[in-house]
Image (tube, rainbow, N blue to C red):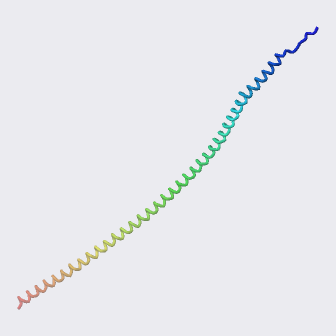
Amino acid sequence: MDIGVVPNVTLFLQAVLFLAFVFIVNLLFVKPYTRAMEEREEIVRKNREEASRLREEASRYLEEARRVLEEARAEANRILDEAKREAGRVRAEVVEKAEKEAQEEVSRAVSEIRRSLEEEKAKLEKAVRDIAETIVRKILGEAA
């Protein structure tokens, strides 16, 4: 008994149509989706690499900024120390000049006082002589 299975043409036709459907779906939906996913993964990978590079660059800039700031602090401290030394030197010069001027003023005042004293002494001596002469004249005038 032979069942005579004759292949049904519609089964082959459905298989061909299914394969065509799978091919078209693959062509229209799966490949673009896969391509879009790969592009996104590539963009994400590039963004991560860029972020990593930028993070390293920012770290270098931050380190450079810290170094420059430290150098600036050291320079500022050096300038302040130098300014303090200069101010001390100027202060010493001003004090020395003021002391010298004060000493000169004292010397001038002492000289002026001595000169005045000598003048007054000379006037006093002249007055004493005049008085002595007057007394001598009066005594000589009474004795004569």
Question: Which residue is farthest right?
Answer: 1
Q: Position of residue 122 (x, y in %)?
A: 20, 82
Q: Position of residue 143 (x, y in %)?
A: 6, 90
Q: Position of residue 117 (x, y in %)?
A: 23, 77
* Above or below 91: residue 114: below
* Above or below 93: residue 5: above
Q: Position of residue 112 (x, y in %)?
A: 26, 75
Question: Which residue is farthest bottom?
Answer: 144
Which residue corresponds to the image point at 74% horizontal and 27% vertical from the top-left?
26
Q: Is residue 2 left or right of residue 95?
A: right
Q: Is residue 81 left or right of residue 97?
A: right
**Which quadrant is home to the C terminus?**
bottom left
Residue closest to the eye, 133 or 23: 23
Q: Which quadrant holds residue 100?
A: bottom left
Numbered label tally: 0
Residue closest to the eye, 114 or 59: 59
* Above or below 114: residue 18: above
Residue closest to the eye, 25 or 10: 10
Which residue corresponds to the image point at 30% horizontal and 74% vertical from the top-left?
108
Q: Is residue 30 left or right of residue 102?
A: right
Q: Is residue 11 left or right of residue 82?
A: right
